[in-house]
Image: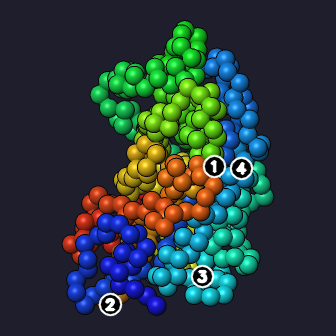
């Protein structure tokens, strides 16, 4: 049974909803495309950062660098039943039996963490069913997830570099370093015990590693290293490590949240600007368009990375903040969900939700509480279809994908 949108919102989100549609002309959700970040993993390198950043030995992890952990697997699996209930209520998944290829498509990047995230989620979404997962052999590059580097969607280096500098704002990177000096000092204290020359992340000013046609622009220096260090602390916390191991006992959960601003800031500078995002997301945009079209399945799930989330967030200029995380920081297992809807006349619309577990929920090994994960509809600037702030026409949504 397909429910009117106002009732669906109350059931699915349990939180604030968009303005109700006109009486007698309800909107019905008929397609969903989910882009989910992989679950909790260790740092992708060992050691996690260069030795000059800290004299400390980084904590041990139960898996290889960059691999999904058992704790991360369990956390992802807790989301499968939540998503299944939401989509069954909306009529996107069958009430019983296994969903087929016409109902659901699952795509994953070729990293172990993205493949295993898709597997854990699919197994919990439809227990006892074998759902196909579209992915390249592990560690074989997939051009859909690396459109710029693979040459699938070359960028204009001048425009990309200019977009980063424009996002940095007046005073450029020097002004950002000055603005975030207290937090840079705090992260140096966690890394070094006492801030001192030759230790920490703040000794080198932030700079730009410029783009080429097949290379995205990147940051260097203080903010780049602070972003990496902050993400490692966040992953330690999300893994459920004891506080004595998070930042060697020198970091609190409040520090983890506050320092996450560096990870989100890096994405704001080098992943969300449209000149970069539209190219880097080009391979996945094809999957999203298909999922929002009439020939696609009712549900499409893409298991990807934080960069992919930041790209899509930038294309629609949407923003979120999950408890325990900095604003716009992509949460492990968190997802942007595009929902296509139609009215009685057949006119189609798109809204966007962000669904993720809070930091405390990720740390816990317990089942999700009755209120479930964080789940919010995100306003889309410039969209006001049917007089509803943040609701796009399908045509507008597809245009934003590039």
Marks 4/3: CA distance? 29 Å
Element under disc 4 = loop
Please provide percent x and percent y for residue 263: 49, 38
Q: Nearer the N terminus, badge 2 or badge 4? A: 4
Cβ atoms at labels 1 and 4 below 8 Å apart = yes
Q: Which residue is mark 2?
A: 344
Residue under the point 52% across and 49% down:
360
Front of the two marks 3 and 1: 1
Say which residue appears at 77% left-offset and 55% top-offset.
Answer: 138
Left or right: 28, with 45 as reference point: left
Query: Which mark's residue is nearer the viewer, 2 or 1?
Result: 1
- Looking at the image, residue 47 sits to the left or right of residue 220; the answer is right
Q: Are marks 3 and 1 in contact (CB under 8 Å)?
A: no
The numbered mark, 3 or 1, whose residue comes first in the sequence reads: 1
Circle on res. 69? 4
Q: CA–CA distance between discs 2 and 3?
A: 22 Å
Label 2 and label 1: CA atoms lie apart by 42 Å
Task: Please tell me whether residue 369 is drawn above or below residue 266 in the rendered image.
Answer: below
| Mark pair 1, 4: CA separation | 6 Å
Q: Quadrant of the C terminus?
A: bottom left
Q: Is residue 21 above or below residue 391?
A: below
> At 32% across and 79% down in the image, what residue appears?
6
Q: Which mark is residue 103?
A: 3
Distance of mark 3 from mark 1, alpha carbons? 28 Å
Return the residue nearer the eye: 113 or 302.
113
> Mark 1 = which residue?
40
């Amino acid at each position: 049974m397909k429910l009117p949108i106002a009732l669906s919102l109350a059931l699915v989100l349990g939180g604030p909803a968009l303005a109700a549609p006109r009486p007698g002309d309800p909107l019905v959700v008929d397609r969903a495309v989910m882009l989910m970040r992989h679950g909790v993993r260790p740092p992708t390198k060992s050691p996690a950062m260069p030795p000059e950043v800290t004299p400390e030995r980084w904590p041990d992890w139960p898996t290889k660098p960059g691999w999904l952990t058992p704790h991360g697997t369990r956390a992802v699996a807790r989301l499968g039943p939540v998503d299944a209930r939401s989509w069954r209520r909306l009529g996107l998944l069958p009430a019983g039996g296994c969903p087929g290829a016409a109902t659901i498509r699952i795509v994953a990047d070729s990293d172990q963490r993205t493949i295993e995230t898709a597997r854990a989620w699919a197994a919990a979404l439809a227990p006892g069913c074998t759902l196909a997962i579209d992915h390249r052999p592990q560690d074989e590059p997939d051009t859909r997830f690396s459109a710029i580097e693979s040459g699938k969607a070359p960028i204009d280096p001048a425009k990309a570099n200019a977009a980063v500098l424009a996002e940095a704002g007046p005073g450029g990177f020097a002004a950002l370093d000055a603005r975030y000096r207290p937090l840079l000092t705090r992260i140096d204290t966690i890394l070094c015990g006492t801030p001192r020359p030759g230790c920490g992340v703040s000794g080198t000013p932030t700079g730009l590693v410029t783009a080429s046609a097949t290379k995205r622009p990147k940051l260097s220096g203080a903010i780049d290293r602070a972003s990496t260090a902050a993400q490692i602390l966040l992953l330690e916390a999300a893994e459920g490590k004891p506080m004595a191991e998070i930042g060697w006992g020198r970091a609190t959960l409040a520090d983890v949240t506050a320092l996450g601003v560096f990870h989100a800031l890096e994405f704001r500078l080098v992943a969300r600007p449209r000149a970069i995002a539209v190219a880097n997301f080009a391979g996945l945009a094809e999957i999203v368009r298909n999922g929002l079209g009439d020939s696609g399945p009712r549900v499409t799930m893409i298991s990807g990375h934080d960069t992919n989330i930041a790209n899509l967030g930038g294309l629609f200029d949407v923003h979120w903040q999950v408890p325990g995380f900095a604003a716009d920081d992509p949460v492990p297992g968190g997802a942007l969900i595009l929902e296509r809807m139609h009215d009685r006349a057949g006119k189609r619309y798109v809204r966007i939700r962000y669904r993720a577990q809070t930091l405390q929920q990720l740390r816990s090994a317990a089942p999700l509480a009755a209120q479930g994960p964080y789940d919010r509809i995100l306003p889309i600037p410039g969209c006001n279809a049917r007089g509803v702030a943040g609701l796009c026409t399908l045509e507008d949504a597809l245009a934003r994908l590039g």
